[in-house]
Amino acid sequence: MMMIIRHGVLQTARDEIDWTVLTALSAIFLLGIIVGALANYSWDWNFASTAIITSSITAAAAFIALSFIDKQWQFNPAENNFSAFDLYSSTLIFLAIIVLVSLAVLFSTRCNMVLTLLLCIGVFLLGLVSDYIFGRFAGENVFAKIAYAIVPNLQVFWISDAIYLDSSVPFKYVLKCGAYSFSYAAGVIAIAASFFQRREVG
């Protein structure tokens, strides 16, 4: 996401293409496929997981490299087109994904793939409006309070208001969201582990 933000949208034919970003994205994609295929052929490793891990490591290395290299392939950190707001917003989206992934693991212990996907979509949509549906009644209704605590509040990770109002996002807010995301995910994974231990495999 940070690479896409750096490249931006080419609105006219005169806009300059950021070949450093395109090269990095191509390297991430090709290296993941090549390493995954070679590892699968040579050592019988799972192709999908190997390719994803390789691409993730390569993407992190590419992001660090692009933080110091400008469009002309010169060492120029001041022209990397990355801002703290972009970094914080990407981090918040990643934290929201952690919550959804933990719920996907929980649902998969009792549901098939299609039902797990539908439940994840439902929780995602419900989490975006959790404040409006449950939050405003949590102080008056005990069931709304319980639902507000169980359903993940994904609205806290969505900072579109800050974009529209052209305001900043403090680092302390990102830390609070991180604590909420990891605490919620840890609780869900613990429940998923207890469910999986009672499930018959085979």
Image: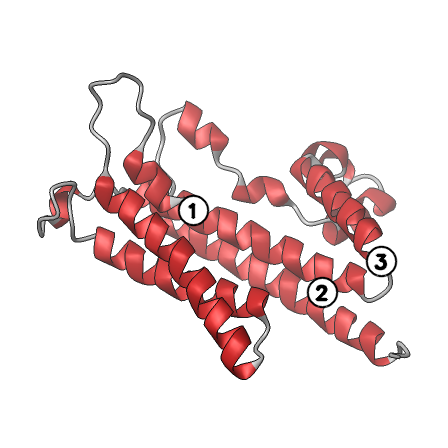
The residue at which mark 2 appears reads as: 188
| Quarter of the figure that contains the C terminus | bottom right
Gap in angstroms between the C-alphas marked 3 and 1: 30 Å
Gap in angstroms between the C-alphas marked 1 and 2: 23 Å
Q: Earlier in the sequence, mark 2 or mark 3?
A: 3
Dot 2 falls on a residue whose secondary structure is helix
Q: Earlier in the sequence, mark 3 or mark 1?
A: 1
Residue 12 pos. (x, y %) = 27, 16
Dot 3 falls on a residue whose secondary structure is loop
The residue at which mark 3 appears reads as: 112
Residue 58 lies left or right of residue 68; in this view the side is right
Q: Residue at image x 65%, y 45%? A: 153
Q: Earlier in the sequence, mark 1 or mark 2?
A: 1
Q: Residue furthest front?
A: 41
Quadrant of the image occupied by residue 111: bottom right
Dot 1 falls on a residue whose secondary structure is helix
Compare residues 95 and 12 and report the one nearer the observer.
12
Residue 5 pos. (x, y %) = 34, 37
Residue type, numbered disc 3: Asn
